């Protein structure tokens, strides 16, 4: 089974950025644990701060892989283009947010992406990526 994790802007700074909200682990450290927990799942990771690069990646993998776990960061709340890319592809996408966006500023309450995703996992910290993988394994 091939699952891709895609992180959007500023998520390269996990472990450094706003630790009280996002925790103190880097994504690379977390990912190593995730890969050893799911040895039978081929987990690939991609991160970009650039909207068009995220769209290109969705197009590249979105017709052949088993699942995509997407945390589009702030683009979640702004990007019709990423929403359209998710609608265009056939691979199921699970939207993840580390923080509970509904407890935060009003502008974080709306996602352009959710209605085109298989489901959403919000507010469980980094463990949200694992929960998303579980949901894709179960199908
Ligand atoms: C985030 C929530 C977004 O509102 C924010 O812009 C992020 C991270 C999360 O994982 O909680 O960059 O997607």
Image (cartoon, grey):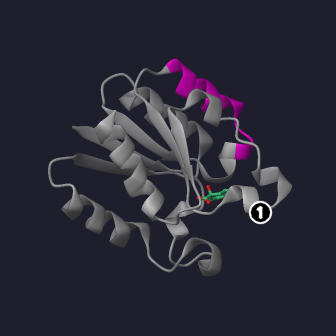
Q: Residues within 10 Å of mark 1 (few under 14, many from 20)?
A: few
Quadrant including the N terminus: top left
Ligand 1 placement by image quarter? bottom right
* Residue 90 relative to residue 32: left or right: right
Query: What residue lies at 35% left-to-right and 39% top-to-bottom?
Result: 136
Q: Is residue 21 left or right of residue 40?
A: right
Name the image quarter holding residue 77: top right
The residue closer to the viewer here, 21 or 59, is: 21
Label 1: which secondary element: loop
Locate residue 10, reporting x and y percent.
59, 62
The answer to whether the beta carbon of the residue marked 1 is less than 8 Å from any atom of ligand 1 is: yes
Residue sitting at x 15%, y 48%: 40
Question: 43 or 50: nearer the eye?
Answer: 43
Residue matched to label 1 = 104
Please state the horizontal and vertical placement of residue 38, each as a whole percent of the image.
21, 55
- Which segment did they paint magenta? 77-88
Residue 13, quarter of picture: bottom right
Residue 41 in the figure: left or right of residue 96? left
């Amino acid at each position: 089974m091939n699952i891709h994790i895609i992180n959007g802007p500023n998520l390269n700074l996990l472990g450094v950025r706003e630790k009280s909200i996002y925790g103190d682990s880097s994504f690379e450290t977390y990912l190593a644990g995730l890969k050893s927990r799911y040895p039978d799942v081929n987990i690939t990771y991609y991160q970009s701060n650039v909207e068009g690069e995220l769209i290109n990646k969705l197009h590249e993998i979105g017709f052949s892989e088993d699942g995509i776990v997407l945390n589009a960061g702030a683009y979640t709340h702004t990007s019709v283009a990423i929403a359209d890319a998710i609608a265009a592809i056939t691979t199921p996408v699970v939207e993840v947010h580390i923080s509970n966006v509904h407890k935060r500023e009003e502008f974080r309450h709306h996602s352009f992406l959710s209605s085109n995703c298989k489901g959403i996992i919000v507010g469980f910290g980094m463990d949200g990526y694992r929960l998303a993988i579980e949901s894709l394994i179960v199908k």
